[in-house]
Amino acid sequence: MNGQFSVVIPARNEAQALRRIIPELNERYPEAELIVVDDGSDDETAAVASAAGATVIRHPYPMGNGAAVKAGARAATGAALLFMDGDGQHAPGDAAKLCEALSRGFAMAIGGRDGRAHAGFWRCWANRFYSALASWITGRRIDDLTSGFRVVDAAKFREFIHILPNGFSYPTTITMAFLRAGYPVTFVPVDVRQREGKSHIRPLRDGIRFLLIIFRIGTFYSPLKIFFPACALLFLAGMGNYAYTYFTEGRFTNMSAMLLLASLFVFLIGLVAEQITALMYQRRT
């Protein structure tokens, strides 16, 4: 590890955890740039971070975890960016493993958690579902879609900074964006500690947002993966309705025609969207 990387920690009311995290980071990586983004905290988060020697960026009100990450990434000067949560779950010692993976040619190395690391049964299964869905859309196995512990190539990360959401689902977006852009991504097993303080994630609200973002990124980077299944369902529904009405009434109904035409339109829209995506990612010489 050398000084050519920046550590970005988004934090909201995490003064207790930062009292432990920042000194450990300073001890292990004294030459690294350390940035803490205080996302409208009500406690001493900014004061604790500043006293420990970190550069502090303050938001006047809570703007979201993603907004904090983007603010830190814009301010960072390192060639690589190490993101870790401010709740004390991520062990600073594991950062070396992530940076080592980046030195082997990966554009992003993600700290992958096992099932025991997720808070609660439903959070664990929800993450597995999101990871499986994202794996299908991207065509690449994703072990942990929502991990906030990762190291990325700074220049490549900034290519996608404008599409990152301001909420907690930024890891979902950036992971899928890197994979669909063809950048090499790897998952590195890491240990996860018990978090300090209260989680700001609301499972139902943020779970729905995660799902919508997966589909949004899917249609942005691999449209036919979304449009073709919808096309197939409409086509099968139309043919099924036609078969039923033909054998029961001996006729072709308007409903069958509407379903089959809808199937055709969805397919054509997906095809056009796929071509637009290909043009967008065409390498310029």
Image (cartoon, grey):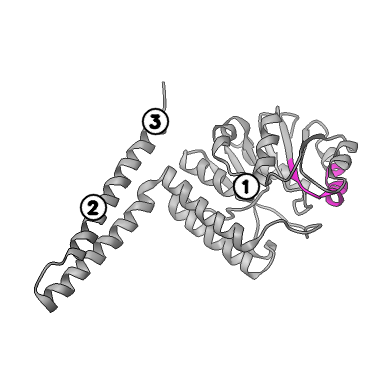
The dot on residue 264 is 2
Q: Which residue is drawn at 66% across and 60% down?
A: 202
* Residue 141 seen by the camera: no
Q: In the image, is residue 13 part of the stretch drawn in magenta?
A: yes
Q: Is mark 2 on a helix, strand or loop?
A: helix
The dot on residue 155 is none
Q: Disc 2 vs disc 1: which is toward the camera?
A: 2
Please say if 213 is above or below 151.
Answer: below
Which residue, given by chain and number where applicable, does mark 1 sit on? 110
Q: In the image, is residue 205 part of the stretch drawn in magenta?
A: no
Q: Which of marks 2 and 1 is nearer the N terminus?
A: 1
Q: What element carries label 1?
A: strand
Q: In this view, does 272 lie to the left or right of 250?
A: right
- Out of 197 and 34, give the one closest to the viewer: 197
- Out of 220 and 124, give the one closest to the viewer: 220
Identity, as a three-letter code, of the amino acid under mark 1: Ile
Q: Percent from the top left, x then y, of residue 159?
A: 55, 32
Please say if 146 is above or below 126.
Answer: above
The dot on residue 282 is 3
Q: Which residue is drawn at 56% across and 62% down?
A: 128
The residue lying furthest to the left in this view is 250
Q: Which residue is drawn at 67% across and 62% down?
A: 118
